[in-house]
Amino acid sequence: MRFKLFLILCSISLSSAGQIVNTATMDTLESTVIGHLAVGGYIDTYYGYNFGRPANSSNPYFVSSNRHDEMNVNLAYIDLRYRATNFRARFVPGFGTYVNSNYAAEAGTLKNIIEASVGLRLSAKRNIWMDVGVLGSPYTNESAISKDHLMYTRSFAPENVPYYLTGVKVSVPLNTKWTAYLYLLNGWQVIQSNDKNKAIGTQVEFRPNKKMLFNWDTYVGGNQTAQNPDFRMRYFTDLYWIYKANDKFDATSCVYIGLQERNNASTKNWWTANFIGRYHFTETLSLSGRIEYYSDSGVHQLPITGIDGFRSYSTGLCFNYQANHNALFRLEGRQFFSPDNLYRDENANPTGRSSLLTASLTAWF
């Protein structure tokens, strides 16, 4: 029975290897299979230096790898998965500065749940699954798992949408190229929600060939919180593209827009667009580059300098060295530009520019 399960897992891995992987998910770790149980692990360490030298040692506007001038752990977790023919379960406890920042609003031990879900196969013939619990988010082409992405640091895009969701997810393969997902959620990146109105999310994946993937997501739901009691309905949609031309070049791009209704006030919005490419010089050495723009009228980002509205460009280069098949060293330089004084310089004066240098060593097993 164990050998049969091992063959099933291997066949799944081999079939998915021939097509583009959706990097929004957290399903890319290697695992050690013991009977029905698969075990994996991940450790992302980093050192970041912000040339503005923030007084609180935290890089503003970001939750990933956001500590200044200290060696730290961005995210470390153990991935436990159980799978039978018509049942599956997953538990991923996590730790690190990403968890400290991104889960600050969650209560107690909920702060350390990266994923925790139970799934039932509703149709064996069509391979339809229903998963319930804390789930990975489909929104934007970047998850919290840096090894899966062309640049080490996260773009503005994923930092301002959910990294995780809580609720019910139904997965429906339509054919070999199309897959649809429906979500019933507690809300916008929350485990324990104060807003009792549920939210609806949708996701559609399209793989026209083995080199390309398109993904379209939507979100509609109430978003009243203790921090923002005037917030009402939120509407969001994104579209992203993942492309792997060959062993030399791969790229990805994402665009989205969100609208936030408010009680007795005008609707606010936030939107972004980015493009990231990577060129492989050898099997172990590659160079990535990114350009992006992000605009927010006050939904997620409130400028630390007190001006009204948030507008910023970002460019960056990332050197990647694949030290081993499961170890990656990266060195990234990133420059931020804004027509407004969003940032602060080393003397704490408002400025329209900011520079960040980050080194990372990541391993998974």
Image (cartoon, rainbow, N blue to C red):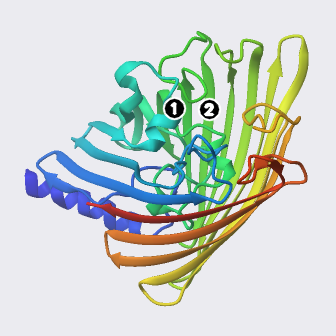
* 36 left or right, relative to 232: left
Q: Where is residue 345 drawn, in percent x and y?
A: 75, 53
* Circle 2 SS class: strand
- Viewer-proximal residue, 315 or 221? 315
Q: Where is residue 41 drawn, in percent x and y?
A: 27, 52
Callout 1 environment at 10 Å: few (<14), some (14 to 19), or many (20+)? many
> How many numbered marks does the figure carry?
2
Kind of residue at badge 2:
Gly
Residue 106's place in the image compared with 236, above or below, is above
Identify the residue shown where x is 37% and y is 32%: 113
Residue 225's place in the image compared with 71, above or below, is above
Identify the residue shown where x is 61% and y is 47%: 59
- Viewer-proximal residue, 137 or 212? 137
Is residue 132 in view?
no
Is residue 184 in view?
yes
Q: Quadrant of the C terminus?
A: bottom left
Q: Which mark is residue 201?
A: 2
Callout 2 environment at 10 Å: few (<14), some (14 to 19), or many (20+)? many
- Viewer-proximal residue, 158 or 139? 158
Identify residue for label 1.
Answer: 165
Quarter-wise, where is residue 14 in the image? bottom left
Cβ–Cβ below 8 Å for labels 1 and 2?
A: yes
Q: Where is residue 338 drawn, in percent x and y?
A: 84, 54
Kind of residue at badge 1:
Leu
